[in-house]
Amino acid sequence: MTYHSLTQPGTREINEDSTAILEQDGRLCFVVADGLGGHGKGELASQKLTEIFSQAFALGAEDGEAFLSSTFTLAQDEIMSEQKRLGVAFEMKTTAVALTILNNKCRWGWVGDSRLYMFRKNRVKARTLDHSVPQMLALSGDIKEKQIRRHPDRNRLLRVLGVEWDSPRYEISDEMDLVDCQAFLLCSDGFWELIDEKRMCALLKKSSDAKQWLEAMTAEVTANGTERDMDNYSAIAVMI
């Protein structure tokens, strides 16, 4: 298995994205978070989330579902507490996507529009569904899936960490055998908006490891973002 990560500010002054690659005793966890909020508060939220994942993973993780559920819940509680401490209610928010690989099993959880793609035989076999207005429109058939990337409401999110919850807002996938997976891509919307799934698959087919694959995709992202107001963009590539 190989893996590689990046996080870049785009054309913004502050990078509100955060990433984490965690490894302990053969267990792995990958995290990408995209912070939301004025004056850098989103940066604090995404950093807080990756810190909580790092601390929780260091304590041990044997069951992916239990780990993801408890850690997302703890991150939500910590971000809400930090907002109260700083007096910045509703300004520290973040999306998040996390992948665990434990005992040759994998599972992922997410909230917001940071995505995970799972690939098999150089094709996308699974993708997290965004918690956003355009994703809901696509699911209802009002727009096509490919129109999400350019939809005027693409930044309107329906679920994030850092706002009051009546019930948990994250989702967790079913468990899968790792042998059924070829590769994973975790990324913020600033990344996936500038490269489509067809190119992800084509570049995966040509790549020998995660670093080569991610660098090829990043070149495509930066080329497609030329002369645009580029958002922060972050990604973690994993190849088995």
Image (cartoon, rainbow, N blue to C red):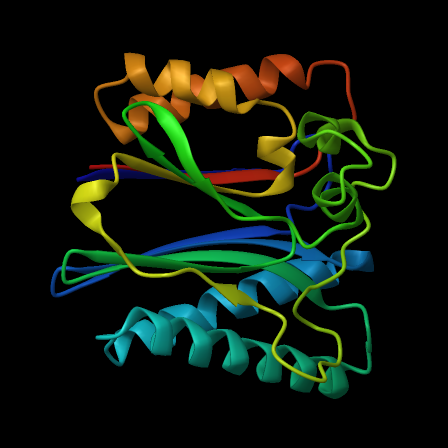
Quadrant where the N terminus lies? top left
Left or right? Give the position of 82 relative to 170. right
Picture quadrant where residue 205 is located: top left
**Furthest-front residue in view?**
141
Q: Residue at x 48, y 16 (%)?
A: 199
Vertical arrangement, residue 128 with respect to residue 198, above or below: below
**Which residue sits at x=47%, y=39%?**
235
Q: How many numbered discs, if any?
A: 0
> Residue shown at 64%/77% (left/top)?
79
Residue 87 in picture, x, y percent from top left: 82, 82
Estimate the x, y position of residue 120 in percent, counting from the top left.
30, 31
Q: Is residue 188 visible?
A: yes
Q: Which residue is at the far right?
A: 152
Between 153 and 3, the one lying in front of the other is 153
User: Above or below — where is 238 with respect to 211?
Assistant: below
Foreground: 51 or 75? Answer: 75
Along the horizontal axis of the image, is 36 left or right of 223? Answer: right
Q: Residue at x 53, y 80 (%)?
A: 73
Residue 112 in the image, given as x and y percentages of width and height: 65, 56
Say left or right for 212 vs 11.
Answer: left
Q: Is residue 28 above or below residue 6?
A: below
Residue 91 image offset from top left, x and y in percent: 80, 68
On the image, which quarter does residue 181 sit in?
Answer: top left
**Residue 237 visible in image:** no
Does residue 183 lie above or below 218 as drawn? below
Quarter of the image with the C terminus is top left
Q: On the image, which quarter does residue 70 sit in?
A: bottom left
